[in-house]
Image (cartoon, rainbow, N blue to C red):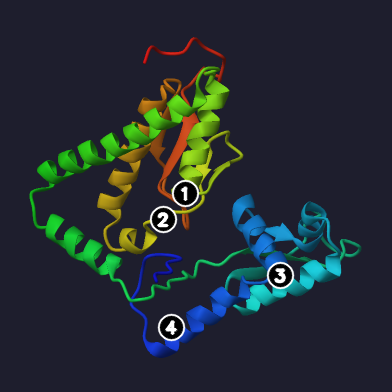
């Protein structure tokens, strides 16, 4: 039997027990729903917001959110959300966001990240130009296949809006957690390869960019482009409409 929540680090017995305990916190159905709600919304969440979204009492929401904080799955901060300050502004609200701490559990033990680290270290010893070109071709090709499959699912009513929805669904399935940001871009709230990017950021970011470019090309989203825009705690790539473009219905491509 193999259970993998995030391919990653090698665990000593004590650390393994701690990881199992954290994962066990999610066994409670309501707690699990809350965790997925906070992780999926892409920004800090208040108790009132979570209670309204899940249609349960604020007291019950507070209890389960704090349990998730105790287990290290969420982080809590305090901030006034009214926009006011000074006397009469009210008490700061307790806000929750997903912790940056990774969950890693594999039974029996697998060391996928170790293999990836060794491969990346080997890549670093090869002339950069050739490696970057090969990586771009492979990642672009992989993304293009994902995009072509998503475009096929969108038939027969192919529109820009439908294709964009397919793109975000693919990215969600790959663990990138796409969310619209204030600038009108689709920001990727999570890098599924963060453990590797920490030591090999240039290679991993180039790979992510080529993957996104291939995905958009396979989908046929010509008015949308991927570009590097590194932000702390996020994937280095964002997706945005090209200047002057807006998603509109258009005639399907052949094939």
* Residue 206: image location, x then y, percent: 28, 44
Report which quarter residue 150 is drawn in. top left
Q: What's the CA distance linking mark 3 and mark 1?
A: 23 Å
Residue labelled with disc 4: 16
On the question of residue 42 being in view, the answer is: no
Front residue of 204/242: it is: 204
Mark 3, secondary structure of its residue: helix
* Residue 157: image location, x then y, percent: 55, 17
Q: Give the farthest residue toward the bottom.
A: 14
The crowding category of the residue bearing disc 4, from other C-alpha atoms within 10 Å (few below 14, some 14 to 19, many at least 20), is some
Question: Left of 100 or right of it: where is 205?
Answer: left
Q: Name the mark nearer the viewer: 4 or 2.
A: 4
Q: Residue at 26% x, 58% y: name it.
A: 200
Image quadrant in which the N terminus is located: bottom left
Among the two numbered marks 3 and 1 on one chain, the one whose residue lies closer to the N terminus: 3
Q: What's the CA distance linking mark 3 and mark 2?
A: 24 Å
In the image, is residue 113 above or below residue 215?
below
Q: Are marks 2 and 1 in contact (CB under 8 Å)?
A: yes
Residue labelled with disc 3: 65
Q: What's the CA distance linking mark 2 and mark 1?
A: 6 Å
Image quadrant in which the C terminus is located: top left
Residue labelled with disc 2: 192
Q: Residue at 14% x, 45% y: name it.
A: 131
């Amino acid at each position: 039997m193999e259970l993998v929540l995030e391919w990653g680090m090698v665990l000593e017995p004590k650390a393994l027990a701690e990881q199992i305990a954290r994962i066990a916190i999610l066994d409670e159905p309501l707690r699990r729903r809350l965790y997925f709600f906070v992780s999926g919304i892409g920004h800090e969440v208040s108790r009132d917001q979570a209670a309204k979204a899940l249609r349960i009492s604020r007291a019950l929401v507070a209890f389960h959110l704090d349990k998730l904080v105790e287990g290290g799955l969420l982080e809590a901060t305090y901030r006034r959300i009214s926009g006011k300050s000074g006397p009469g502004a009210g008490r700061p609200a307790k806000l929750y966001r997903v912790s940056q701490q990774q969950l890693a559990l594999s039974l029996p033990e697998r060391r996928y990240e170790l293999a990836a680290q060794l491969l990346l270290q080997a890549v670093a010893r090869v002339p950069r130009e050739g490696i970057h070109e090969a990586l771009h071709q492979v990642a672009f090709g992989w993304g293009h296949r994902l995009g072509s499959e998503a475009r096929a699912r969108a038939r027969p009513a192919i529109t820009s809006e439908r294709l964009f929805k397919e793109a975000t669904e693919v990215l969600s399935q790959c663990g990138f957690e796409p969310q619209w940001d204030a600038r009108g871009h689709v920001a990727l709230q999570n890098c599924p390869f963060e453990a590797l990017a920490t030591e090999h950021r240039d290679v991993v970011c180039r790979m992510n960019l080529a993957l996104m470019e291939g995905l958009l090309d396979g989908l046929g989203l010509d008015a949308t482009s991927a570009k590097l825009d590194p932000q702390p705690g996020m994937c280095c790539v964002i997706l945005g409409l090209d200047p002057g473009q807006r998603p509109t219905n258009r005639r399907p491509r052949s094939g």
